[in-house]
Every structure is written in C-alpha cells, then in structure tokens.
Image (cartoon, helix red, strand yellow):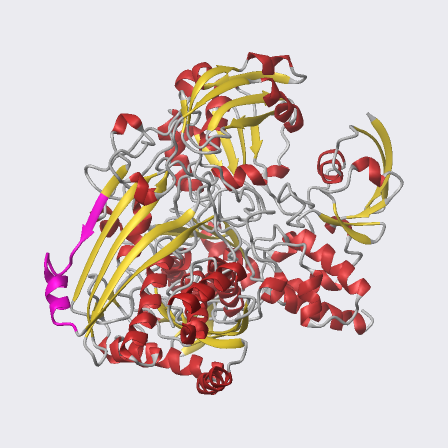
C-alpha cells in the first residue's frame, strides 16, 4: 500500500488552492482549446438593427467561400431551430414569446441571430458571413421601459399585443396594510432609483464544442457554462436528443457571474447541427458578440417609498418596480426581480411591506442573472433610501439603522417580506467595521472640510446589507413556480489505496471548489486534503447536480459533501468493528482512525478499511463491498449572510471626480471553510459592485444600437480604478445547515454599490444633492452638483 | 502565405502563415500554445500578453509576420526547473480565481518588475492597467506582484 500522510484539521485554514498549478502554467483546459478532427466552425450573422423585419435572406452566397460546408437561415434550419427555454413562468398569465435560436422573419435586438455558416476554420466561417445577402426593413424600436408600457408604444412582439410580460404583487400583511402604516407616519420619503443595465463581462468568452463521441450515438458538449447539469436537461428538451445520449462537460470555465447560467441560442445550434451532420461543431464568440448576445443584468426602475415616525421608527415600505426583460425571456429572466422582492425589507423591522413589479419587453438584449440577481437591486434601493430618510429626519444614518435593525437576540426573525432569518449579529459586524474604518474620526474630518469649504469634500457611505443564499429549498422554488428543485448531490468513494474521489454536482468557474470541498471531506473522513480529488463539471462522471450560482455551492453542496462523508464513515465503522471484534458503538473515530474505547491499541485507519472493503474477504454478513456513499441534500431553508460596508469617498467639487479613500467591510458569512478563498470572493464582489456605482453601464440609443458593445466602450475597471480593501469578518453560524455556512459569492457585489453612492451623496449633501445617477462618472457627478447648486440654494 | 521563423518558448518554429494572422492565433492554432488566450477584440483586456524579445506585448495586436525573427515567451515557457517568482507569488497571495486573465497578468507583471524592480502599490496598479481581471478586484494581484518583487530582490 502507498504511504499514507497524516490528517491535519483542514476546515478554517487558508490553504493555497489546488487549482492554481494548472492555471498559472498555461495548462488550463478551456473549451476553446479543444481541437477535434473534422470539426466545423460556426460563425453567426447577427442583427445590426434593434428592431426590423427581415425582408430578404439568401445564404447561398456564403457557400461559394473557401472552406464553407453549409449555411443556414431559419428557413434552411427548419425543425432544428430550437427555442431558448424559460424555466420560471412567474405568473399563470405571463406573456412568454417564442425565442427561436435563429430569428424567424423579424429581429428584436441588436445581436439577434439571423444566419450561420459552417466552415473548416473559424476565419473561413467569419469571412463567409460576407456572402450572405440580408435586407432589413426597420421597425420602430422601444428601448425605454416606461415608454414600452404606454398605450400605442411600438410592440416588441406584435402578436402578443402588449409589451407587458407580467405583473407581480406581494402584500404579506394584506392589501391596504401599507397604506394603514403610512397613515400613522410623520415622515414619508419617496425616491426613484435607476438600477442601470450591466454586462457580466466574464473574461473567458463563451465557447461550445458539440461532437458525436463513442459508439452509441452519444453527443458530447463542452461548454463554457456554469450549469452543465441544468444545460443537459434543457438541451434534451429543446433539441429532442435523448437526454441519456447527451453528455455535457464544463471544462475549466473562466468566470460566469450568472452570465453562464443559461441555455444559449448558440449551444442549441451547435448541438442540433452536430446531431444532424454527425460532425463536431465548434463555436466561440468574439467579445463584441459577447457584449450584445450574452444576457445582461439589472436594468430596473425602482420607485421606493418608506414611512417612519419622527423619531425614526420604520412603519412601512412600498416598492414598485419596472423590470426590463429585454427582447425575449431566457432561463430565469422573469424571476430575477422576485429574488430581490424578498430582500427590500433587508435587516429592518417594519409593520407592512408592499411590492409590485411589472416585467417589460424592450428591443434590447435579454436580461437574466448577474452576480446577486435581484438582491443587489433591492439592497441598493433600501440602503439608499435609509440614507435619504435619515437626512429627512435629521438623524445620523447609522443611528437610524441601529434603531430599526433586528437585534441579535431576536433571531430567528420573520421579516415583513415573510422570510425567517435564522441568525445574524448586525451589532457586532457594525462595531467592528466602524472601529476599523475610524468612523468618528472621518465624521470629524468631514465637518472640518465642510466648514472650510474645501474643494474636495469627504463623504461617508454606509451599507448594512443582508442577502438570501443557498438557493434553495425545492418546495419553496415550486411555490414560486420555478420548475426545478434546489438540492445538491455528492458521491464520495474511498479507493483501495486510501485515495478519495469526491464527485460534486456543483460546477466551479473560479471559486476554488477543488480546494474547499477537499477540506470539508478531509475533516469528515480524516484523510489528508491532498489525497482527495474533486471531480466536477461532467454529467457522465457527476450525473446529478444543480450546479453553481446564487451562492449555493457551499451552503447547499457542502451539506451533501458532509452527509456523504458521514455515510462513508458509518459504513467503515461497521467493517472496522467487525474486524476489531467489537460493537460499532464501542469505536471512537478520530483523525481517520477507528479505536476501541478503553483499548486504544486496537485500531484501524479508514484507508485500511477501504482496502478491506475492496478485497471483501472479511466483511460483516450482508454488507456490500466497496467504501462509498452518496447523498442528495435538499436545503431546509435559505441562509442569510450579512455585513457592514463603509466607504470614505473624496469628491472633487470642481471636476466631479470621486476617489475612494478607504473601503472597509466586515462580512458575516457564518463558518468559513477557507478564509483565503472567502477573502478573494469578497474582493471580487466589491470590485463588481463598485464598478456598477462608478463605471459600468450598458447604453442603447433610441434605435436599439448598443453603444457599449466592446471593452473599449464598456468600462470594466482595471487596477488603477480600484483601491485596496480592508476586509474582516464576524462569525455567526447559520442554523439552517450543519456546516453553519451561509454563502459569500455575491456578498461584495450586493453590499458595495449603495455604500459607494451613499458616500458620494453624503459628500455633496451640503450642496443640495440628494441623489447621483449610476454610474457616477465625473461628468455625471459634476452635472448633478451644478444642477443642485443652480436649482436649490 | 508568408514564411516566418519565430522562436517560441525556446523552440524555433518555421511556419507558413496568412499575412493577416494575429500572433495570438499563430501561437494557439499553429504552435499549440493554448496557454495564451483571447479575451477581447479591441486590445483592451491583455489576456493574450506574452513577452516579445523580452518585453510584454499583447499578442492580439501583433501580426505573426511582424514577429518574424523574434523570440516569444508565453506563460508555458516562463517557468524553468522551478516556477518564476511571479507565478509562485500569485499562488501564495491567491492572485487568481478563474485564471483566464492570469497568463497575461503574469507576463505583464514579469515585464513590470523587469522595468521597475521596486514598485509602489500605485506603480503596480498603473503598470497593470492594460490587463483586465473580473474575479479578484486586483487586491490580491497587487499583493502578488509586491511579494514577487520582494522575492526577486532576495536573489531568487
């Protein structure tokens, strides 16, 4: 047998990542690296128009180009032209237009797929798009959401007779409850916030290879996806290829942030064509294609009204959203605002909550999940209006929050939105953050700068956020009309040599699951981290899974790892007891070794038990050979990470330039498995949330031209655009899962946007500024400041 | 087609290329150096950064024919018997997550440190301005480069 290293407790240690070796030496397995003999490369002709009739389409000219083997429009594709699925019909009467992979006679957003070419190389395919003759007749486009729901607006789908996708209401305290609460209020503050459209902009562009493999008519699909398992089910349903003939592999995937949680047009086309032609089909997008055809995020108009007593006690909250669906519905497009719906009351106690949302079609790229998915929008609106309310009341904004938040001794607590938060300690996180930030000193400096009329003003922005993670209890999802469940799966096999295979249904794309999952299993099994191999992202080797999104992988998938590991130990205990000639109850299990209580000289390591389970020479009667177990865990409830984020911003009142002077956050994500990875997740989230506040925004003109369709126009921040961060944590374990974990992937992105904007508004409050639109680019801030100076005082 | 002689990671390659072929596509498709990746089409992201005769260059903004007679080092050729100190520092400081920007980020950092062996935080940030990362918020990348600078000063 191989020499076995000793187990050292792994959970909670900042272990360096296992993944890094291949990523740092260029040995990564990206989808675009896959080269198969006989492959045809797909190039797609996309609509340059926001809305138009296709009056002529002739693809035959493309066939004359070198290397071209086929060209298709919707007519040529016929029955192979599958429709992009939406799996979250949020209401019974939701309007769900057909979304064919190749447009049928009409294009509805810039980037809509019109035709495709298959050729021997990617360059040949791209060249041959020039040979396609297409003529458009422009139709009026509708971009603005409020225009879209007016009578007489141009229709995105004329056959539907409306641009309204759905109307959703939530009134947990009943109709009229908010109005009754408002009637008792001394102060009511109402604001319109614009949560602008963002582009996920993961670094690895989407890529797909679909190929017949093996001898049984199987199709293997490699895709840069977050969701190989979900994708397999949907590709089977859409293309008609039998699910058990489809194998979906997510190799190394270069970021996702929700943008690769999808069943995309291009994936459907590759599978359908590979199946028809019996040839490998490969496609990878250019960045410009990515910007116009990968789903976008956010894009909500938020009317929010908050009612309070004059001493600052919250009474009620009313939220009316208009949410941009884009031109079509994709996988969970209509559900995104509902993920936010539950979070507007946030950490605050109030009597009544009233929510409504209108989903609207426009001639823009479809929206869907982007890091936080609904919850950043909710957090932005509530944390912004808390500052506005504090200003109206003449209260210190942190004092207003303290007066209204759920106290640590009040958990579990059921909020006005109807969620029961299991645990939290907002006081502890806030105290720690304020101390690290030197809150009082900065406030004192702010007073001085205001008094001296310094041209650079100092603002302090607060965000005391929470979010719901661990999507999700399957019954809850069912009640919300989401068609799938929210469980997660794990199989653990201890091989004859004592090495372990851990098969997970989660599908990482940068989160370090190979390391963190090894740590959990290591402590459960008492086997060293380096002896554990994490297998993921392939439906042949990990047949069950719900994949990675919504900060669910640890909070849900971690439970399955723990339970599968416990089952392995339970089985190993029976074998050890049999061979040590004692009762299973008489065995202690510590650091991977079974010992007889009272006679510790009698012992057996779990790795030795694994060999016994393999040889099967001397197993208890009736016990099956091999040492393995699987577990599928449906979470009992969500978990609720929280934290206090503080931003000190210097705003130059002459140029409008905002510069982050310090950013402190104290997050409580419960028990941490690997603090190094946790910190990295927070940093990345902060960057994306700060980028929404300061830099990013997808912009369309009135004809539907996407003006930000490249990295030259869409401002993804680079290193000099961001500060270093001060991150710390408190630990309040979740009580809804046995690991006590909560989820961290989205926290930074959810919390930081309002902290940044609150800081800018706070800096400019003396000038009469009460809001700054996002992204708060210098020109925008300067204009806002000048308008306030001229308008107000 | 045009004939080019390019040394890639120490090995001389004589190839026929279309004059329009970008260096990055030559590296990936003709030499098989798929460790170098493409992230955009506007020379904005820097994921394709390599060393061209020892200086960093975005291989999407160089034609293969322009590299004729030159020596290219990619992420795959950076390590000798041991990892380059920049690679080691990125692992130590968790300077990468998904890893897609990493090859370009590492090559840019190598060039940055050869130009300025003792950079301040601001100089590191400015020096990496041409490389986008969507995962790390740059915090740990900056720490990684600072650590690599320390290590390299120690003569490693």
Q: Nearer the viewer, residue B56 or A393?
A: A393
Is residue A666 in view from this perspective?
A: no
The residue lying at 61 percent from left, 38 percent from top is: A32
Q: Give the residue drawn at x 56%, y 42%.
A: A205
Q: Is A291 positioned to the left or the right of A32 in the image?
A: left
Whether A135 is among the magenta residues is: no
Residue numbers of the magenta segment: A167-185
Above or below, comparing residue A704 to residue A582 in the picture: above
Say which quadrant the N terminus of chain A sits in.
bottom right
Q: Position of residue A174 (x, y in %)?
A: 10, 58
Q: Is residue A435 above or below residue A653?
A: below
In the image, is residue A274 above or below residue A251?
above
Q: Quadrant of the C terminus of chain A?
A: bottom left
Counting every numbered tag in the picture gives 0
Within the image, what quadrant is residue A43 found in? top right
Which residue shows up at 66% across the image and 49% down it?
A: B47
């Amino acid at each position: 047998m191989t020499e076995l290293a000793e187990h050292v407790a792994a959970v909670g240690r900042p272990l360096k990542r296992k993944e890094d070796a291949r990523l740092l030496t260029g040995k990564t397995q990206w989808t675009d690296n896959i080269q198969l003999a006989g492959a045809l490369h797909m190039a797609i002709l996309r609509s340059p128009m926001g809305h138009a009739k296709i009056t002529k389409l002739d693809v035959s000219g493309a066939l004359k180009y070198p290397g071209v083997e086929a060209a298709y429009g919707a007519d040529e594709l016929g029955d192979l032209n599958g429709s992009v699925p939406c799996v979250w019909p949020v209401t019974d009467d939701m309007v769900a237009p057909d979304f064919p992979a190749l447009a049928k006679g009409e294009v509805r957003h810039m980037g809509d797929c019109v035709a495709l070419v298959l050729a021997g190389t990617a360059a040949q395919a791209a060249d041959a798009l020039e040979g396609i003759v297409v003529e458009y007749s422009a139709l009026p486009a509708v971009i603005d959401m409020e225009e879209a729901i007016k009578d007489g607006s141009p229709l995105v789908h004329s056959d539907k007779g409306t641009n309204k996708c759905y109307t959703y209401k939530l009134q947990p305290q009943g109709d009229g409850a908010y109005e009754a609460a408002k009637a008792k209020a001394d102060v009511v503050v109402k604001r319109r916030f614009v949560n602008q459209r963002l582009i996920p902009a993961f670094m690895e562009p989407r890529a797909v290879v679909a190929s017949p493999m093996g001898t049984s008519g199987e199709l293997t699909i490699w895709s840069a996806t977050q969701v190989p398992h979900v994708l397999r089910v949907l590709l089977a349903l859409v293309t008609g290829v039998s699910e058990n003939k489809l194998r979906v592999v997510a190799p190394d995937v270069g970021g996702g942030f929700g943008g690769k949680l999808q069943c995309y047009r291009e994936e459907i086309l590759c599978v359908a064509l590979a199946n028809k032609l019996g040839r490998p089909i490969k496609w990878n997008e250019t960045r410009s294609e990515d910007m116009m055809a990968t789903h976008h995020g956010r894009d909500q108009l938020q009317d929010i009204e908050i009612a309070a007593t004059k001493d600052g006690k919250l009474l009620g909250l009313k939220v009316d959203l208009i949410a941009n669906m884009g031109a079509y519905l994709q996988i969970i497009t209509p559900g995104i605002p509902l993920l936010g719906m539950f979070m507007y009351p946030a950490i605050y106690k109030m009597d009544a909550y009233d929510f409504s949302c209108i989903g609207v079609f426009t001639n823009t790229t479809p929206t869907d999940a982007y890091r936080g998915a609904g919850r950043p929008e909710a957090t932005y609106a509530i944390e912004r209006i808390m500052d506005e309310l504090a200003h109206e009341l003449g209260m210190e904004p942190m004092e207003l929050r303290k007066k209204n938040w759920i106290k640590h001794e009040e958990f579990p607590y059921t909020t006005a939105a109807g969620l029961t938060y299991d645990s939290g300690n907002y006081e502890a996180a806030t105290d720690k953050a304020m101390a690290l930030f030197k809150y009082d000193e900065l406030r004192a400096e702010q007073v001085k700068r205001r008094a001296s009329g310094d041209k650079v003003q100092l603002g302090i922005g607060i965000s005391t956020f929470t979010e719901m993670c661990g999507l999700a209890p399957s019954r809850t999802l069912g009640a919300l009309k989401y068609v799938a469940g929210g469980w997660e799966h794990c199989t653990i096999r201890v091989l004859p040599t004592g090495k372990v295979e851990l098969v997970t249904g989660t599908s990482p794309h940068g989160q370090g699951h190979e390391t963190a999952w090894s740590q959990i299993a290591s402590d459960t099994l008492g086997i060293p981290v380096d002896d554990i191999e994490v297998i993921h992202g392939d439906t042949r080797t990990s047949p069950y899974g719900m994949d990675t999104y919504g900060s669910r992988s640890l909070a849900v998938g971690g439970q399955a790892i723990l339970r599968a590991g416990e089952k392995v130990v339970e089985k190993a205990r029976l074998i050890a007891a049999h061979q040590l000639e004692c009762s299973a109850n008489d065995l202690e299990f510590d650091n991977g070794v079974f010992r007889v209580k009272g006679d510790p000289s009698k012992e057996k390591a779990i790795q030795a038990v694994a060999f016994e389970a393999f040889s099967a020479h001397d197993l208890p009667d009736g016990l099956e050979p091999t040492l393995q177990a699987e577990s599928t865990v449906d979470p009992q409830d969500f978990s609720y990470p929280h934290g206090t984020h503080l931003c000190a911003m210097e705003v130059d009142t002459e140029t409008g330039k905002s510069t982050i002077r310090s950013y402190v956050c104290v997050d409580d994500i419960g028990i941490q498995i690997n603090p190094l990875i946790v910190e990295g997740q927070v940093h990345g989230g902060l960057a994306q949330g700060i980028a929404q506040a300061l830099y990013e925004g997808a912009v369309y003109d009135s004809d539907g031209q996407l003006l930000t369709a490249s990295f030259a126009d869409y401002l993804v921040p680079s290193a000099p655009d961001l500060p270093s961060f001060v991150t710390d944590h408190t630990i309040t374990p979740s009580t809804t899962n046995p690991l006590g974990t909560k989820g961290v992937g989205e926290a930074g992105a959810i919390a930081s946007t309002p902290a940044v904007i609150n800081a800018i508004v706070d800096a400019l409050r003396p000038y009469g500024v009460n809001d700054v639109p996002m992204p708060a680019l210098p020109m925008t801030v300067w204009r806002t400041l000048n308008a306030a100076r001229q308008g107000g005082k | 087609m045009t004939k080019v002689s390019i040394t890639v990671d120490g090995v001389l390659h004589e190839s026929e290329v279309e004059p329009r072929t970008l260096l990055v596509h030559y590296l990936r498709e003709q030499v098989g150096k798929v460790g170098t990746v493409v992230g955009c089409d506007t020379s904005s992201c820097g994921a394709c950064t390599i060393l061209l005769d020892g200086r960093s260059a975005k291989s999407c903004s160089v034609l293969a024919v322009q590299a004729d007679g030159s020596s290219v080092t990619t992420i795959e050729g950076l390590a000798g018997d041991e990892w380059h100190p920049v690679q080691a520092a990125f692992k130590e400081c968790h300077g990468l997550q998904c890893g897609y920007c990493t090859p370009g980020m590492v090559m840019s950092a190598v060039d940055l440190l050869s130009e300025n062996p003792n950079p301040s935080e601001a100089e590191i940030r400015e020096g990496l301005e041409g490389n986008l990362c969507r995962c790390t918020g740059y915090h740990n990348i900056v720490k990684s480069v600072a650590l690599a600078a320390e290590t390299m000063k120690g003569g490693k």
